[in-house]
Image (spheres, helix red, strand yellow):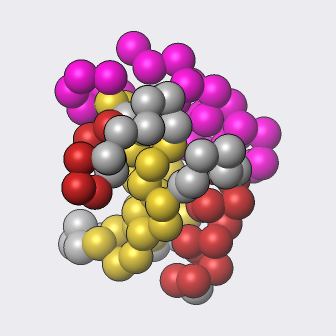
Amino acid sequence: MNRYAHTLVEELHAAGYAAEAPWPTGGECEQIGLQVGALEVGITNGDAALPDGEVHDGLIAYVSARDADGDELDAVPLPPGGSIVDAVAQLIDRLT
Protein backbone atom coordinates (compact mmCIF):
# COMPACT_ATOMS: atom_id res chain seq x y z
CA MET A 1 0.00 0.00 0.00
CA ASN A 2 1.24 3.47 -0.89
CA ARG A 3 0.87 5.74 2.16
CA TYR A 4 1.41 8.88 0.10
CA ALA A 5 -1.74 8.18 -1.93
CA HIS A 6 -3.74 8.20 1.30
CA THR A 7 -2.21 11.56 2.25
CA LEU A 8 -3.33 12.92 -1.12
CA VAL A 9 -6.90 11.74 -0.51
CA GLU A 10 -6.86 13.56 2.84
CA GLU A 11 -5.68 16.76 1.11
CA LEU A 12 -8.43 16.45 -1.51
CA HIS A 13 -11.08 15.85 1.16
CA ALA A 14 -9.87 18.91 3.09
CA ALA A 15 -10.33 20.97 -0.10
CA GLY A 16 -13.90 19.71 -0.53
CA TYR A 17 -13.32 17.05 -3.20
CA ALA A 18 -15.08 13.69 -2.74
CA ALA A 19 -12.04 11.57 -3.60
CA GLU A 20 -12.36 7.80 -3.38
CA ALA A 21 -10.02 5.67 -1.33
CA PRO A 22 -6.97 4.70 -3.40
CA TRP A 23 -6.77 1.27 -4.99
CA PRO A 24 -3.63 -0.55 -6.17
CA THR A 25 -2.81 -0.70 -9.85
CA GLY A 26 0.34 -2.78 -9.52
CA GLY A 27 3.72 -2.42 -7.87
CA GLU A 28 3.79 0.65 -5.66
CA CYS A 29 1.28 2.53 -7.83
CA GLU A 30 -2.20 3.48 -6.69
CA GLN A 31 -5.12 5.19 -8.40
CA ILE A 32 -7.43 7.78 -6.82
CA GLY A 33 -10.72 8.67 -8.46
CA LEU A 34 -13.10 11.57 -8.04
CA GLN A 35 -16.14 12.74 -9.95
CA VAL A 36 -16.49 16.45 -10.78
CA GLY A 37 -19.73 17.01 -12.64
CA ALA A 38 -19.53 14.95 -15.83
CA LEU A 39 -15.75 14.63 -15.54
CA GLU A 40 -14.08 11.58 -14.09
CA VAL A 41 -10.75 12.68 -12.64
CA GLY A 42 -8.10 10.03 -12.05
CA ILE A 43 -4.92 10.55 -10.10
CA THR A 44 -2.13 8.01 -10.45
CA ASN A 45 0.62 7.90 -7.83
CA GLY A 46 3.75 5.94 -8.62
CA ASP A 47 6.32 5.23 -11.30
CA ALA A 48 3.86 3.78 -13.83
CA ALA A 49 2.12 7.15 -14.16
CA LEU A 50 5.13 8.85 -15.67
CA PRO A 51 5.82 9.01 -19.39
CA ASP A 52 9.02 7.52 -20.79
CA GLY A 53 9.76 5.46 -17.69
CA GLU A 54 10.81 8.44 -15.54
CA VAL A 55 11.01 7.63 -11.84
CA HIS A 56 9.70 9.85 -9.05
CA ASP A 57 8.87 7.56 -6.13
CA GLY A 58 6.33 8.86 -3.65
CA LEU A 59 5.09 11.69 -5.85
CA ILE A 60 1.88 12.19 -7.72
CA ALA A 61 2.81 12.10 -11.34
CA TYR A 62 -0.32 12.36 -13.45
CA VAL A 63 -3.81 13.85 -13.02
CA SER A 64 -6.17 13.13 -15.91
CA ALA A 65 -9.82 13.73 -16.75
CA ARG A 66 -12.05 11.43 -18.77
CA ASP A 67 -15.52 11.85 -20.15
CA ALA A 68 -18.45 9.48 -19.60
CA ASP A 69 -17.16 7.26 -22.44
CA GLY A 70 -13.76 6.89 -20.77
CA ASP A 71 -11.91 9.02 -23.32
CA GLU A 72 -9.08 11.09 -21.86
CA LEU A 73 -9.77 14.79 -22.34
CA ASP A 74 -6.73 16.40 -20.75
CA ALA A 75 -4.02 15.75 -18.20
CA VAL A 76 -1.77 17.68 -15.82
CA PRO A 77 1.53 16.30 -14.54
CA LEU A 78 2.25 17.15 -10.94
CA PRO A 79 5.86 18.23 -10.42
CA PRO A 80 7.83 17.41 -7.30
CA GLY A 81 6.61 19.58 -4.45
CA GLY A 82 3.42 20.50 -6.30
CA SER A 83 -0.05 20.60 -4.77
CA ILE A 84 -2.55 17.91 -5.70
CA VAL A 85 -5.41 20.31 -4.98
CA ASP A 86 -3.92 22.92 -7.34
CA ALA A 87 -3.36 20.31 -10.07
CA VAL A 88 -6.96 19.07 -9.86
CA ALA A 89 -8.28 22.65 -9.85
CA GLN A 90 -6.10 23.53 -12.86
CA LEU A 91 -7.40 20.53 -14.80
CA ILE A 92 -11.03 21.34 -13.96
CA ASP A 93 -10.55 25.01 -14.91
CA ARG A 94 -9.10 24.00 -18.28
CA LEU A 95 -12.05 21.75 -19.03
CA THR A 96 -15.00 23.78 -17.75
Q: Residue at x 56, y 71 (%)?
A: 91
* Relative to 33, 8 lies left or right: right
Locate residue 76, reporting x and y percent: 49, 66
Locate residue 70, reporting x and y percent: 23, 67
* In the image, residue 2 lies in the stretch drawn in magenta: yes
Residues drawn in magenta: 1-28
Q: Which image quadrant for residue 1?
A: top left
Work out which residue is located at the far top of the displayed protein and give it.
1
Above or below, comparing residue 85 to residue 14 in the picture: below
* Relative to 13, 74 lies left or right: left
Q: Is residue 31 visible?
A: no
* In the image, residue 34 lies in the stretch drawn in magenta: no
The residue nearer to you, when weighing 49 against 41, is 49
* Relative to 87, 22 lies left or right: left
The residue nearer to you, when weighing 82 against 54, is 54
Locate residue 36, reporting x and y percent: 55, 64
Q: Residue at x 66, y 66 (%)?
A: 89
Q: Residue at x 77, y 48 (%)?
A: 15
Q: Is residue 83 visible?
A: yes
Q: Residue at x 43, y 54 (%)?
A: 62
Q: Which image quadrant for residue 88?
A: bottom right
The quarter of the picture where the C terminus appears is bottom right
> How many numbered marks appear?
0
The residue nearer to you, when weighing 53 against 4, is 53
Locate residue 48, reporting x and y percent: 26, 41
